Amino acid sequence: MKVGSQAGQDAWQNMSDAFNSDCPAREVLEHITTRWGMLILAALRDGPRRFSELHATIGGISEKMLSQTLRTLVRDGLVARTVEPTTPPRVSYELTPLGQGLAKSLEQLLRWIRQHTIDVVTAQRRHDQQHR
């Protein structure tokens, strides 16, 4: 029988096991790995940006989806929303320290995608031709 801190560690481990269907890590994984979540985090790597700058940077994202995804990332503690008391108010978004750590990890994935996109597209085309 596990007692004390060992039992607490096991409970925490289960809360951060994305393979467990009841795990809160699944929700975090979903927020981070969506197309828009990843692109927003990557766009904020170089510093704060206003909503309109993010919208212009991330091709194809609607204002509604950008707004929803930013709200989610702010709630998750990955992005900070700052409102400057001007007229009209100036709102900017930037990575929190937690988000900066994540963005560094995502950079490796994005680098891999840039390096291997041609290989993946070639494989897709080959597969599609074989299965026609």
Image (cartoon, rainbow, N blue to C red):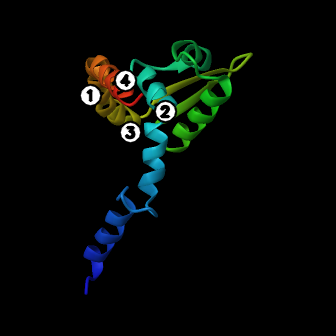
Which residue has dot 2 on it? 37
Q: Please state which of residues 12 and 34 is positioned toward the viewer in this rendering.
A: 34
Which residue has dot 3 on it? 98
User: Which disc is residue 108 wearing?
Assistant: 1
Which is in the foreground here, disc 4 or disc 3? Answer: 4
User: Which disc is residue 23 wearing?
Assistant: none
Residue 124 image offset from top left, x and y in percent: 35, 25
Which is in the foreground here, disc 3 or disc 1? Answer: 1
Disc 1 to disc 2, C-alpha distance: 16 Å
Which residue has dot 4 on it? 129
Indicate the quadrant containing the N terminus: top left, top right, bottom left or bottom right: bottom left
Query: How many numbered discs?
Result: 4
Disc 4 to disc 1, C-alpha distance: 31 Å
Which is in the foreground here, disc 4 or disc 1? Answer: 4
* Callout 2 secondary element: helix
For label 1, the crowd category at 10 Å Cα-Cα, with few meaning under 14, some 14 to 19 and many 20 or more, is few
Q: Please state which of residues 28 and 49 is positioned toward the viewer in this rendering.
A: 28
